Amino acid sequence: MARIIMISGKGGVGKTTVAAATGLAASKKGSRTLILSFDLAHSLADSFNLDLSLFDHNKGRPTQVAENLEIQEIDVAEELEREWSTIYQYLASLFASAGVSEVVAEEVAILPGMEDVVALIFINRYINKNLYDTIVVDCPPTSESLRFVNITATLEWYVKTRFSFDRQVGKLVRPLLGKSSSKMGIPEDDYFNSLKGMFSELNGIQKRLLDPTQTTVRLVCNPEKMVIRETQRAYMYFNLYGMTTEMVVINRVMPTSEGYFSRWAENQARYCQEVNEYFSPVPVVPVPYFANEVLGMERLSEVADVLYKQEDPTQIYVNQPSYAFAKEGDGYVLKMNLPFVDKRELTMTRSENDLVIRIGNFKRYVPLPTAMLHYSSVTAKKTANELQVIFQK
């Protein structure tokens, strides 16, 4: 079973450096390792200081950079044309028919979230084929990382509720419209076949992402108030989606000094202490602001030594599910790890067999066990770090 380590955080905090150092450290322990980037602004090859042209991403395919270590910077357009050209061509023609120029139509045919789907398909394939022991995912900034985690649930909803209906409507309408059907944006059946094939490649990936013995999150931040606040929100939302955060990395910590940077160092020391208090018992690892730019194997090895101190970087530092059900008296209680949120910011509703928990713009569907479906009374209470949802008849 391949280990999946997701490196996430606010843009610009050094996620790619931490991902590269983690992958390098894992490969040195003998683990067949892939570092996968699906951020459209790729910088993974730059981190390894590879002698490549500005936009050379090896057509989105894995590139070996060291023994047991490969990197992959996903090229969404390349993958869509290579493997799902029917979907890509339909979307491009749809935008072109709406008056968008052909060049622009090909660009906007890459809909938001497509890079997430392609990345998940690659991860699923590699695990099914046992190609790697460790997959380190260099995530885009926080909000896109959260979409990446939740997109399988969105696609599952579409398959269950709309896919068959849309396909049947297409079959009925196309003969009536004849040649005009393509002008009106009615897709051919090949489009639905390609879509079905794409969905089938995602089978099982959601279970893998939510398995704390296989997939965990490591958050990267800087010792700055705005960044720490976003890291707290990311930690809360990953918990909401059922993922385990097992490490927080504070990157670019300045050494104590006198003179111009002394105030910066003092503020950073205070923020580092706050991060330790916020995220306990999750391990917090400070990484210093290095004297030289972190590029290439030698510098990345220095970062890896600070992060993991010769330990196995694929180990799981915290292994506990973000929520669990328990029988209490005549009812049941759902306990969910949700720090940094006030009860007043929570809303809960029932949707068929799920409990829907919403915080801000994010929501989580928690599947309810069969035994709890007939419990109509639902109340909640919030402690410092935990939400308890109580089900009673």
Image (cartoon, grey):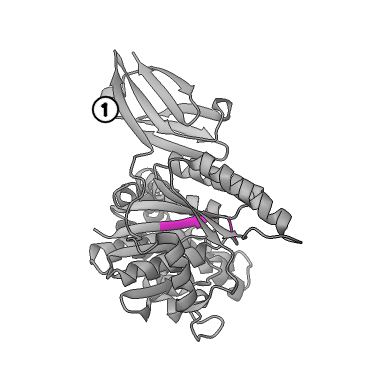
Residue denoted by label 1: 370
The part of the image, by quadrant, that contains residue 78 is: bottom left
Q: Position of residue 357 (x, y in %)?
A: 47, 32
The part of the image, by quadrant, that contains residue 370 is: top left
State yes or no: residue 132 in magenta: no
Q: Residue at x 34, y 62 (%)?
A: 123
Is residue 203 found left or right of 170 in the rendered image? left
Could you tell me the amino acid type at mark 1? Thr
Q: Position of residue 86 (x, y in %)?
A: 41, 69
Estimate how packed mark 1 is, as few (under 14), some (14 to 19) or many (20 or more) residues with alpha carbons within 10 Å: few
Residue 118 vs residue 345, the one in the foreground: 345
Compared to 22, does 265 lie above or below? above
The magenta-colored residue range is 6-11
Q: Is mark 1 on a helix, strand or loop?
A: helix
Majority SS type along the magenta span: strand
Is residue 85 found left or right of 130 in the rendered image? right
Q: Residue at x 51, y 80 (%)?
A: 49
Residue 75, can we see it? no
